[in-house]
Amino acid sequence: MTVTPATKTYTLSAGIVPVRRFPGGPRYLILRAFNYWDFPKGVVEPGEEPFAAARREVFEETGLTELVFHWGKGYQETPPYGIGKIARYYLAESPRGEVYLPLNPLLGRAEHEEFRWVGFTEAQPLLVARLKTILNWADWLVQRGFADD
């Protein structure tokens, strides 16, 4: 999917910031490809809604299927980056399920080498500036509470 803010066209990716409750506080799932950490995300396919793409990408990249959208379908987008990209992230609780890094049939290997559930402070040195903004947004919502709290 492409988006056209102002007069330039960008490729839209969609993803989810998965959060899980741990005894020491909330932790967020990040994935590493080479030396770059990010939340699960991928390109929105033609005709696909960004929210559906985000859910699909989480499953394809982590195997997680049970997501609870306590905070609705609101999202936060990154500023443009790379060669004409914008990433849109939603926030969801992942209350259970084992993360694994499935084989991507197009690559012949997993897209990511590692995953971690990290707290807010632990994530800071791992994320680039545009993703820290996404984490700040997600953590602000999480700190306000889960819908059933």
Image: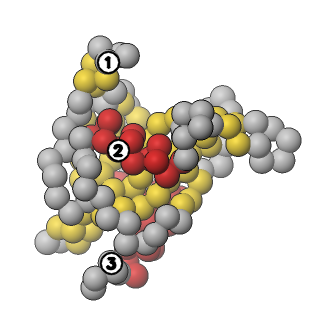
Quadrant including the N terminus: top right
Q: Position of residue 94 (x, y in %)?
A: 26, 59
Can you identify the residue that label 2 sits on?
Answer: 58
Judge whether residue 30 can be spotted in this image.
Answer: yes
Mark 1, other Cα within 10 Å: few <14 / some 14–19 / many ≥20 = few
Q: Quadrant of the C terminus?
A: bottom left
Give the farthest residue toward the bottom. Answer: 149
> Label 1 amino acid?
Pro
Query: Which kind of residue does numbered mark 2 sit on?
Result: Val
Please state which of residues 113 and 126 is positioned toward the viewer in this rendering: 113
How would you rate the neighbour count of disc 2 (Cα within 10 Å): few for under 14, some for 14-19, many for 20 or more?
many
Q: Nearest the camera: 74 or 52? A: 52
Q: Is residue 105 above or below residue 38?
A: above
Q: Earlier in the sequence, mark 2 or mark 3?
A: 2
Q: Determine the residue located farthest toward the right in the rendered image.
A: 7
- CA–CA distance in space, label 2 to label 3: 20 Å
CA distance separating discs 2 and 1: 16 Å
The residue beneath circle 1 is 105
Counting from the top left corner in percent of width and height, residue 143 is at: 37, 78
Q: Residue at x 28, y 82 (%)?
A: 148
Q: Which residue is mark 3?
A: 146
Q: Given the image, on which type of amino acid does mark 3 rest?
A: Phe
